[in-house]
Amino acid sequence: MTEADVIQIIREGFLTAMIICGPPLIAGTITGLGVALFQALTQVQEMTLTFVPKFAAIFITIVFCLPLTFQRISMYAALIGDKIIRSQAGG
């Protein structure tokens, strides 16, 4: 396995992690901003009010993104498997 292969695996790993973690983080951030705006407008300063909407938004986003998550993880695993097979066959 060459340095280029290792760099490609690391790069694909970071890209896969960003693609998988991006949608739930964006959903949580947008929901948090919406709840914060609601609290600022209504002057309701309840600390536990932010947890339920954020949890629900993140959970729903994860459920809807499961096909994308499994596809990206399987592509990444196939890439690593191909690299391992090529390095074993070549060496």
Image: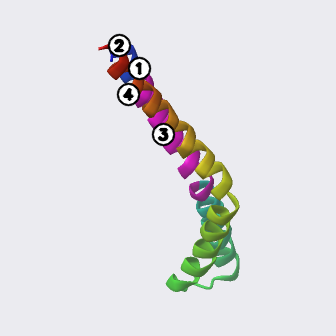
Ranked by sequence position, the earlier of labels 3 and 2 is 3
Query: Label 2 near label 4: C-beta < 8 Å?
Result: no
Q: Nearer the viewer, mark 3 or mark 2?
A: 2
Query: Label 1 near label 2: C-beta < 8 Å?
Result: yes
User: Disc 3 and disc 4: Cα gap in Å?
Assistant: 11 Å
Residue 84's disc is 4
User: Disc 3 and disc 1: Cα gap in Å?
Assistant: 14 Å
Per the image, the residue denoted by label 2 is 90
Q: Residues within 10 Å of mark 3 (few under 14, many from 20)?
A: some
Q: Which of these two is toward me, 45 or 64?
A: 64
The residue under the point 69% across, 82% down is 42
User: Disc 3 and disc 2: Cα gap in Å?
Assistant: 20 Å
Q: Is residue 91 magenta?
A: no
Q: Residues within 10 Å of mark 1 (few under 14, many from 20)?
A: few
The residue under the point 39% across, 14% down is 4
Ranked by sequence position, the earlier of labels 4 and 2 is 4
Per the image, the residue denoted by label 3 is 77
